[in-house]
Image (cartoon, helix red, strand yellow):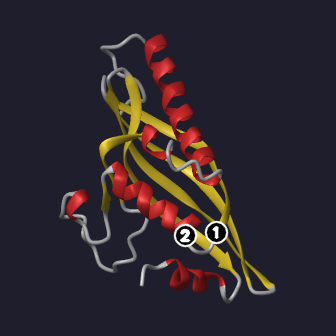
Amino acid sequence: MSLFLESVPVAEQLAWLEEIKAAFALRLRVMDTKQWDRYPEMHTDDVVSETFSSVDGDHSHLPPAERPGAVVGTEALTRAISSFLDGVVTVTSAHHGHTPEITFTSPTTATGIWAMEDNLWWTNGDTEESLRGWGHYHEEYRRVDGRWLISYRNLTRLRVDHTPGFYSYRERNSPA
């Protein structure tokens, strides 16, 4: 598959490419700075995220929105990520996305793979807990009302290093 479509001028597609990169970068900054009112701006109303799924097994035969653990819609996604990073326990985060591989699949759709690294920290009593991870974001984009938005995301991890008590914050951030 070609990076560019033959039916659309390359200059226009280069502008689209920059729009997708900007939406991705804005999402990371808004997430790390906890601007939850802005988080939906970069996503389609029907966005699907499989980033939070911890269900074992191959569910690739199901549509993404029907897979176990999928988060669907901007409200649900914003709620999921904000409770993960900004619930009872505030988790400081720094996310990086690198070397995008973006392919236009039509004049209104594209796919992308981004190498990623994230760093997360929170204070557990007198102990600073931390996580550092590496992997890839697998995303899909859709052009809606002249804007490129994220319509699908899945995070695959290659490696995660963390302190022994890092995941205990989840118990504190979970609703009772």
* Whether label 1 touches label 2, CB < 8 Å: yes
**Quadrant the C terminus occupies:** bottom left
Q: Would you identify the image quadrant in which residue 26 lies?
A: top right
Residue linked to disc 2: 87
| Above or below for 5 versus 114 | above
Q: Is residue 7 left or right of residue 51?
A: left
Q: Is residue 162 visible?
A: yes
List x then y, in percent, for residue 13: 44, 19
Q: Would you identify the image quadrant in which residue 121 lies?
A: bottom right
Looking at the image, which residue is at 48% across and 61% down?
Answer: 81
| Above or below for 154 versus 151 | below
List x then y, in percent, for residue 70: 31, 64
Q: Amino acid at mark 1?
A: Thr
Tell me the number on the disc at residue 90.
1
Q: Which residue occupies the foreground of this view, 43 or 172?
A: 172
List x then y, in percent, for residue 9: 40, 10
- Secondary structure of the residue carrying tag 1 is loop
Looking at the image, which residue is at 55% across and 83% down?
Answer: 172
- Secondary structure of the residue carrying tag 2 is loop
Q: CA distance from mark 1 to mark 2?
A: 6 Å
List x then y, in percent, for residue 110: 36, 35
CA neighbours of label 1 inside 10 A, class few (<14), some (14 to 19), many (20+) = some
Q: Amino acid at mark 2?
A: Gly
Q: Is residue 154 visible?
A: no
CA neighbours of label 2 inside 10 A, class few (<14), some (14 to 19), many (20+) = some
Looking at the image, which residue is at 34% across and 80% down?
Answer: 56
Q: Which residue occupies the foreground of this view, 152 or 174?
A: 174
